[in-house]
Image: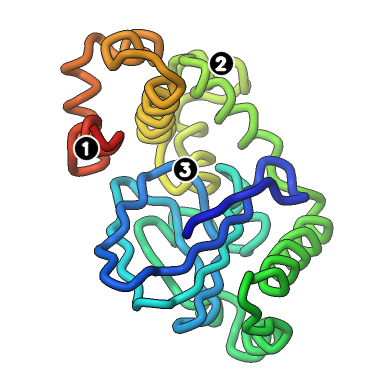
Amino acid sequence: MYRERPARIGGAVLWTATTPAGAGPTRVLPDGCVDLLWSSRAGLLVAGPDRWAFLSRSEPGERWVGLRLPPGTGPAVLGVPAVELRDRRVPLAALWGDRSAAALAARIDEDLVGDVAARVLVGVAASRLREVGGPDPLAARVTAALAAGATVAEVADRAGLDPRALYRRARHLFGYGPKTLARILRLQRALALVRAGAPLAGAAARAGYADQAHLTRDARDLAGVPPTVLLGR
């Protein structure tokens, strides 16, 4: 019942989901992203960047359309620092005001596949990015470097920033400091390697963990369960 596809915003992903009858909570792993959401029950929402897994609970038959913005892009679209949204799910009206959010919601038809909602979410995000000249280019550079395994000191040096300045910029862009973002990206990288066929120990080493036990501890800390549970094993 869950599908995703690339959006026409660099690095963004459109996803749709319908909650089946009898479904339990969905464990949403931290990924450094901010999501602009439409729910058939709750309307327009924003999901801020999480530091640990969020258990999402939906009503049976509830339909969701989400635009997952890449790390660091949320502040440019929403107009607020990511740290103000950290670990939160808030109505879009709380950020843009009742009138603006209501006008946006009025453009969304409750169609069965969510195509209208998807077009509206992508359209408004693209428009706001054009207005501000796009996301801060530092976000993509920091994310790519940390995802490739660079240390925070190396990232700061490449960006021409001292560590404290990088920390302040990271909180604005990602909702937390670069060390937290690096941990989140490392866990995502390890899980992706296992899903692609790598054994857990090999994935842990390639992702930058000291060993498989280190990966397991990090997964329990960030996701609340060991990687075997996350991977359905």
Gap in angstroms between the C-alphas marked 3 and 2: 22 Å
Residue 117, quarter of picture: bottom right
Q: How far across and how far down the image is residue 199, in percent?
A: 32, 13
Q: Residues within 10 Å of mark 1 (few under 14, many from 20)?
A: few
Which of 77/186 is in front? 186
Residue pointed to by mark 2: 157
Amino acid type, mark 1: Val
The residue wearing badge 3 is 32
Q: Amino acid at mark 3?
A: Gly
Q: Residue at x 53, y 58 (%)?
A: 35
Circles 3 and 1 in contact, beta carbons < 8 Å: no
| Mark 2 → mark 1, Cα distance in angstroms | 38 Å
Of the numbered discs in the image, which one, if any, rests on residue 229?
1
- Number of the front mark, 3 or 1: 1
Q: Position of residue 120 (x, y in %)?
A: 73, 71
Position of the C terminus, as image quadrant, is top left
